Image: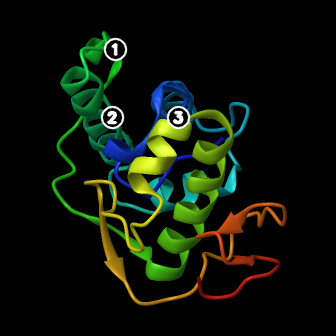
Amino acid sequence: MRLWSVHPMYFDRQALTACWREGLLAQAVIAEPGRGYSRHPQLRRFQETDDPRAAIGDYLSAVVDEADARGYRFNRDKIRTTGYQRKLLVNSGQLGYEWGHLLAKLERRSPVAWQRWRDLRVPDPHPSFTVITGPIAEWEKIVTDDVAHGSRRITGQQEA
């Protein structure tokens, strides 16, 4: 499961579709604790809010907004609730790590998208997040074969 901290405008079709599906799975797990994946580390940011259902709903709403802008037909009615109206926090290191991870995926499967974004050093966060200074999140599973920004391998919990 990958609930990206980067803005969905950077996603290729595959990432946007996967984020939608995985976000819907996260919504189901949050709505029914104890269900499969309920301990998935990426859910923590939503589960630790005072209204996890609305927080994940707002996250999904931004994904649907991007899909709508591209002419895709994601069913907004699948979002159970929204209205968290606060931003979640994401560390700059986490956002940087995810950006490198996404760029590596784009380079392999969507060269046009990769070409468009490859020189961007700091992406906008997903609309649900505000960026604060800090390292890669402790819950992140580091992928050692992705090269962040084309310059180095990320091999541990370090600031990106």
**Residue 149, visible in the rendered structure:** yes
What's the residue at 75%, 61% (across, down)?
Answer: 146
**Mark 2 crowdedness (10 Å alpha carbons): few <14, some 14-19, many ≥20:** many
State the CA–CA distance, disc 3 to disc 1.
14 Å
Disc 2 and disc 1 in contact, CB within 8 angstroms: yes
Closer to the camera: disc 3 or disc 1? Answer: 3
Mark carried by residue 15: 3
At label 3, the amino acid type is Ala
Q: Is residue 9 left or right of residue 153?
A: left
Say above or below: 7 vs 130: above
x and y percentages locating residue 5 in the rendered image: 44, 58
User: Where residue 2 appears, x then y in whole percent?
Assistant: 60, 45
Disc 2/disc 1 C-alpha distance (Å): 9 Å
Residue 140 visible at all: no
Q: Quadrant of residue 49?
A: bottom left
Disc 2 or 3, which lies upstream in sequence?
3
Q: Residue at x 31, y 14 (%)?
A: 72
Which label belongs to residue 63?
A: 2
Whole-percent x and y of residue 80? 32, 24
